[in-house]
Image (cartoon, helix red, strand yellow):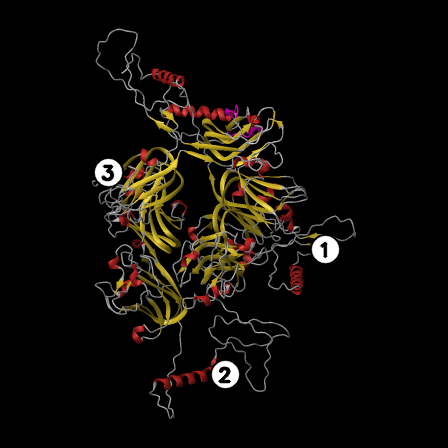
Amino acid sequence: MPVNIATRGIPSQSSLYSSWYARKALDGNNNTCSHTALQTDPWWKVDLLKTYSVNRVTITNRPDCCEQRINGAEIRVGYDSSDVFSNPVCAVVATIPAGATISYSCQGMEGRYVTVNIAGSSKILTLCEVGVYVIFPDNLATGRNVTQSSTYGTWFAGRAIDFSPGSTALWSSCSSTDIQTNPWWRVDLSYIYRVSRVVITNRLDCCPERINGAEIRIGNSLENNGNNNPICAVISSISAGVSSTYLCNDMEGQYVNLVIPGDSKYLTLCEVEVYGEGVLFYKKIFVKMKLKTSSSPSEPVMRVQLLSQLQSAMDSQTETDAEGGCTKCAVIPTIPVGATFSYSCDGMEGRYVFVNIPGTSRILTVCEVGVYVIFPGNLATGKTIAQSSTIGTWLARQAIDLNPGFKQPGSSCSSTNGETNPWWRVDLHYIYRISTVVVTNRLDCCPERINGAEIHVGNSLENNGNNNPICAVISSIPAGASSTYLCNNMEGRYVNLFIPGDSRFLTLCEVEVYGEGPLLKKTFVKMKLKSSSSLSEPERRVQLLSQLESALAERGISDVTLQWTQLSKQEVMRKEAAPGCLSIQEMANGADENVALWRSVSMSSQYMDWRSRYVVDGLYDSCSHTNSETDPWWSVDLLNEYQVEKVAITNRDDIFNYLRINGAVVRVGNFPNNIYSNPICATITTIPPGATDTYSCEMVGRYVIVHIPGDEKTLTLCEVEVYGQLIGNLASNGTVTQSSTSGDWFAEKAIDGNRGLQRLRIGCSSTLTETNPWWRLDLSHVYRISRVVITNRNDCCVEQMNGAEIRIGNSLENNGNDNPLCAVIPAIPGGDSYSYSCGGMDGRYLNLFIPGSKKTITLCEVEVFGEGPILKRSTVKIKLNFRHDLTNPTMRENILEKLGSALADRGFTNVTLSWYQTPQQVIQKVDAPKKNIAINGKAVQSSTLRYEANKAIDNGDLYCTHTETETNPWWRLDLLDIQIIKEVIVTNRIDCCFEQINGAEIRVGNSLENNGNSNPICAEISGIPAGQSVSYSCGEMQGRYVNVVIPGDSKNLTLCEVRVYGNDNVKLSGNAAQSSVFEYWRADRAIDGKKYAPGAASFCTHSKRETNPWWRLDLLDTYYIITVTITNRADCCPARLDGAEIRIGNSLENNGNSNPICAVVTSIPAGASYSYACLDMEGRYVNIVIPGDKILTLCEVEVSRGFPVRHFVKMKFASTSDLTGPEHDKLLFQLQSALGVRGITNVKLSWTKPPQREVERDVEVEEGPCARIQ
């Protein structure tokens, strides 16, 4: 029965209207509702605290008014907490009547977060109740009989298995005993089960330490109320509100007890979950024995001894009497000489396997017996493992011995020595699709050693497998606990755990790997055969495969299945030698790749031996066939989402039954369990016998389904081919080029969706043999690249790929081959596709480049995955002498239109212009950087109890701010302009209540929405000791407002001091280049942080003598440049720098030397550093160039950028002119000139608002030459 688990979650919403909080959608009252403000894309979200399979979601609409507001809302379920719109959609709300509750089926969608959102602007989201219903199919404790040693109040034993962990209404959903000696709680599972794990949820409100020392016991005895049964685990501690998992290694028992030994103890349990397999049935035989003995069986020792002797006798009899004591698996009729036959036992259970021949005078000879078992999920069991080093006897294999080492850690856990980057690896032998990895930490000591460990999954052994893609990073695992990490069906043969850093130990008490597979390794072989026979005859093809299998078996390759991917085609070719001999070339049809080939398939039923997989085997004469039934269907899982362009279906070649396909529907989508939820691609009217018809889809989906609606229908398919592009492959829409082209192996063939395995020469690119060959992909925009997949050629020369470099960036210098390195390819086997993680590198260009002479680069497919495009934003600061008011929207749009036209005239068309902010008429001045920039700001807070907000920025810790007790109290600092925030230091109160600061959030940004409390989070304050100061790093977050807010009801916020460190002047870094290099004086030595030293050769750049020598710094992005500081050489020749020009801009025309001039260097003394103001010039490139036949030497170049600070001046004029008209622009020009005369030139003036006229009473004054200015 589905259970509503929404009430145990933590709700939030995009904004708050009045007091309509997010939690009111989960309070069980249909008359209280959550409510957002009017906004764009409002949302409401509940964090279920862990992953669930969601059966359905219910929504109750408001009863009073505005019921239509809910129309179009989307219900989403997924794992992404930050971007709710990226989670998959469960359902779309068409409408809900006022006060009504509607249920929406999510069909088991998995996720931790359930979101309701409305797309669009000017929307309001109101929810009066949300229910999230899940099914707990595997929890053995569900609905069982429970009891406990005593009951405190109404905290009954049954509340520990009520599916509610007590996160919101604790007293109604947890069990608890009274205070007593040895309190216990017990669940009776009714039958004996093999228990794999027990999950315990601790109380959230208080006293989490009460659970410490509790024992989990499992067995079949009720002696001492079951508390004498064997121990599964001892609970060291569980954090408040947290669920911890304890592995019981398939202990068998009917009763699961929790008991805390000792006096004056409470046992409180908010949820107990029991998982395992069963029911285990045991045959109980009661034997009445009459014994003659001189000893007394009433003595316990004698009874134990007697039972032991009986047990030994029975074991001996079992081992010798095979036929009488065991269940028969199979009878062997015959086995040829030397052959091996396999017999299915269909999952029979037992400890012993016997082979016996009934009868007398028989001889049994066995040359080899293999017993194959299935471990129901843990793929790591019995596999090959290794680790970087071994300490003592803590061997690598002890992490997969099914013993988590709770009793004897030294004998059952693995551990490396203390070393740099320790690792542990399991080889699963085949490629699997990994869903989860479970890691159990050591119990005895040092649990923090696991912190920061990375789980990698993939197929590469480069860097011992530690370069494979990351599944997860382990933040921490409590001592003795087991934590589960979702890998989202990552594919790989190797699973690594790896801790980066020096002097690290890697200790693992158990590693479990779960997933599905193995995934068949498919190798497509292109064969060119000389044959006088026609391979279009099926018998000839079967005969050829048989001969090939025999040849492979003779070479030790037996684990292979050979099939034709497509029917062979005969090609008559002209041949010079051996007249009369035909050459027959076996090749596939077409250049497109059939993405359904050998994928995972299923169908509604199977008629005789007409299997579902025959539809994707590439052979048109083998077909699938369902029984006659209602709505028969067939489905193929493409394993990933594809943009399906077309589906080709081949009908059976049978003139009597070919009409059965009529009316079949082709669907493409993402719902494997409900075919009717997938959109329709096409409806088949008819297909002639043996013919293939193609249907255009242009749809997105992972599953392609063919079904026939109606009763007594039969579905027969001989081949289904699916053609399309893998969703997410950024390369498919890019532009490519390469250093040279061999024949017709064009660069575009590496992104054509054909990996070249079916038809090599049509599907691969290749350069000529040359020095440093390269291939480049232009993605047109900047993307954040997560991984690159390279497919190597399959025919020959696979080693040509060895040593290729993958480079990603935005520069075309050296054809893009100087961009940052993602990975180096050591080797890729023929026809294989290897994935390389790039860790979110940003770039527009992706290059593959092989350094060296006499090299060839051949690529059969390049696939690029990531996110974006990441828009390249250039913020341009414009100083205009303009008679019109640019605060007028029409005038602003007019300016943008003219700028766009001017850019288009210069060839810049792929640009979108918009105002970053409304133009302001202000006086601007660049101030020097400050230390604690908080003391110059303005502070406010949500409420005041005696102490006002500015006490937190008085540069002293004596006086503190204090809000009233309220919901979500906050304090905000206005820095008066955008700053770069590096660090925030918070000082807590010293007198009392220091814990009140716990949970406070530091937020930095530019928005005042929700009083600034919706700005991005810099840090969360877990706790600050009384009177102490704690520093929180914000990186280089940018913002005008710094907020401290405590979420929750009945909170106080007290701050004794808030110090903010940052600046509006930041040194920039980048990549350096120069026109030439003299000896070893490279360009990057001007940005190495070392200004000069005797000899200077180790620290300075130096060009050759040449015309117009130059040096350039690529900042990798566009910035406003405040200053450029140049350090001259100290040893000699300082005059060489005279006349150098500093240029800043975004163009690489003339190597950047045509960009606008910031300054000209007149002279810099030897060893001196001079700064040049560039007045916020904008550009990505900073060049220093000396015109003429010169040498350029630079010992250090420092580039600083910042945000201009604005000062507002209020002026009152006595004037006979009307300053509300165009005259006020003339006044601004006069002020600018007057400031310039006085040496103040780094100022930009504009009006913040138009001047207002004020009529004053005239006052008589003496006439004279001066006008009165008030």
Taking 774 as reference, is 902 above or below it? above
* Relative image position of residue 22 (x, y in whole percent): 29, 47
Q: Is residue 719 visible?
A: no
Q: Which residue is mark 2?
A: 321
User: In whole angstroms, how far apart are the C-alphas of marks 3 and 1?
Assistant: 94 Å
Identify the residue at image location x=43%, y=82%. Answer: 311
* Relative image position of residue 749 (x, y in whole percent): 60, 43
Q: Which residue is mark 1?
A: 530
Mark nearer the N terminus (1 vs 2): 2
Q: Amino acid at mark 2?
A: Asp
Residue 892 among those drawn in magenta: no
* Relative image position of residue 190 (x, y in whole percent): 33, 71
Q: Nearer the viewer, residue 568 or 629?
A: 568
Disc number lying in front (1 or 2)? 2
Label 3: element kind: loop
Taking 754 as reference, is 411 above or below it? below
Q: Amino acid at mark 1?
A: Lys
Q: Image quadrant for the C terminus?
A: top left
Taking 1145 as reference, is 756 above or below it? below
Q: Nearer the viewer, residue 176 or 164?
A: 176
User: In whole angstroms, how far apart are the C-alphas of marks 1 and 2?
Assistant: 61 Å
Taking 177 as reference, is 1225 above or below it? above
